[in-house]
Amino acid sequence: MTETPNRLERRKARTRGALIAAAQGFIARGELNAPIAEITQAADVGMGSFYNHFESREQLFQAAVDGALELLGIYLDSLTDVAADPAEAFTRSFRIAGRLFRLQPELSRVLIHSGPELITSPHGLGPRAARDIEAGVVAGYFRVSDIQLSLALVAGALLGMGQLLLEQPERSDVEAVDQMAYGVLLALGVSDADARDLCARSLPPMSDVPSVDGASE
């Protein structure tokens, strides 16, 4: 029996999703040179199915990183108060993203192994952070002259802190994240008093935490 167009599209989407989820697992483990055969085996799909969706392992891994970044970006958007000022929105997103290193370590490892993608990708955290930094400059909260350099500073701080949290389970994630957020705010030109106030504000409940397999915790 010939599949209907809708059913065929759903099957294709499931196959593509399985490949991306498998690739995210390999990226999280740092296995960036995994053979395509191992990836398709982990995804439980045939080798031919791989080439129906991707031209190369590199293209798949790019889609996997973009997917993880966008997943995290959408989650942060869901917890952002649209009425918040840019400095509060930026600080909240940074503090929530930092806490996810412990709440969702596999997703976090994908981010760490993505490296510069966090800054240059049009998906996920980078564009949102750049938006909030620029809005903060316009509103007079941040005093920076180069948005991209500021974004590189923020991304480096987040990834470096995340690596420490994953490697040092005895370290308090809440204390580390809020301390790093405070330092980042100072670097962006926020006063000491305002930075302390922003980092002390309550965060929304972090339910339905995203994971790289599309499920939630």
Image: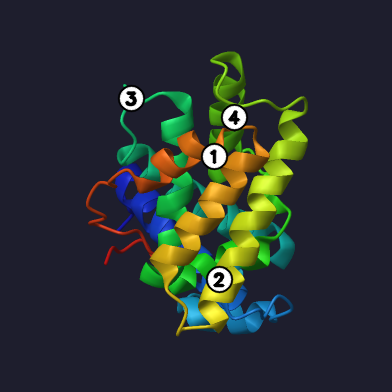
Query: Between disc 2 and disc 4, whose residue precedes?
Result: 2
**Is residue 47 in view from this perspective?**
no
Q: CA distance from mark 1 to mark 2?
A: 32 Å
Q: CA distance from mark 2 to mark 3?
A: 29 Å
| Three-letter code, disc 2 | Arg
* Residue depicted at x 42% and y 33%: 88
The residue carrying mark 1 is: 192
162 over 85 or under it: above or below: below
Which label belongs to residue 82?
3
Q: CA distance from mark 2 to mark 4?
A: 25 Å
Q: Nearer the viewer, mark 4 or mark 1?
A: 1
| Three-letter code, disc 3 | Val
| Three-letter code, disc 4 | Ile
Query: Between disc 4 and disc 1, whose residue precedes?
Result: 4
* Residue depicted at x 70% and y 81%: 35
Which of the pair 46/25 is nearer the observer? Answer: 25
Q: Using residue 29 as the reference point, say whether residue 3 is left or right of it.
A: left
Q: Nearer the viewer, mark 1 or mark 2?
A: 1
Circle 2 crowding by C-alpha within 10 Å: few under 14, some 14–19, many from 20: many
